[in-house]
Amino acid sequence: MSIRPKQFTRIGEFHLEEAVLDVLLEANHEREIIGAAEVSRRAGIFREPGHSMKGGNDAIAWGILGKLIKENRVIKVDQGFKLTDEEFELRRDDVNKK
C-alpha cells in the first residue's frame, strides 16, 4: 500500500508546524516576540526575492500560525506571536522530564 496524497499533506503539515513551534520556542528562550515574516525567515519557509507573489512570502507561516492559535498552542501578542505557557512547558528542554 502506498502513501496517499492526503497522508503526504498531513506529514508535511506536521513538519511545518514543528518548524514554526521550534522557531517560537527559540524566540521564547531569547524573550523575543516575532512576527510571521520572521517566523518564515527563521524556519526557511519563504520564497526567494523577486518571486511573482508580492506579499505571499508569509502565507504559509500565517496559515500554520492560525492553525496553532485555534489549537491554543500559540497566541498573538503585540506585533507578533509566542507559544502559550502550556506549549512552552511541553517543549522546554531546560528541565529534567520524568
Image: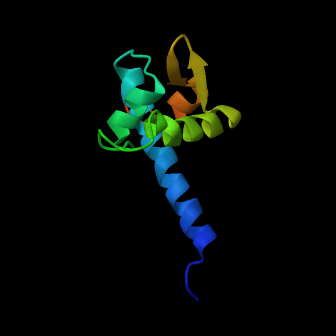
Task: Identify the image's colour scheme: rainbow, by chain, secondary structure or one colour.
Answer: rainbow
Please state, as top left, top right, bottom left or bottom right, where the N terminus lies in the image: bottom right
x and y, in percent, of residue 82 in the image: 51, 23
**Residue drawn at point x = 64 percent, y = 31 percent:** 69
**Residue drawn at point x = 51 percent, y = 43 percent:** 60
Q: Residue furthest left?
A: 49
x and y, in percent, of residue 70 in the image: 70, 35
Q: Residue furthest top?
A: 78
**Residue drawn at point x = 43 percent, y = 38 percent:** 57
Rendered position, 19 above or below 32 = below
* Residue 53 at least partly seen: yes
Q: Residue furthest right?
A: 70
Is residue 72 or residue 96 the one in the foreground?
A: 72
- Count of numbered tags: 0
Rendered position, 97 above or below 29 = below
- Classify residue 26 as left or right of residue 65: left
Is residue 2 or residue 46 the one in the foreground?
A: 46
Is residue 92 or residue 4 the one in the foreground?
A: 4
* Residue 25 at least partly seen: no
Q: Residue furthest bottom?
A: 1
Rendered position, 45 above or below 80 = below
x and y, in percent, of residue 3 in the image: 56, 79
**Residue drawn at point x = 35 percent, y = 44 percent:** 51
x and y, in percent, of residue 77 in the image: 56, 14
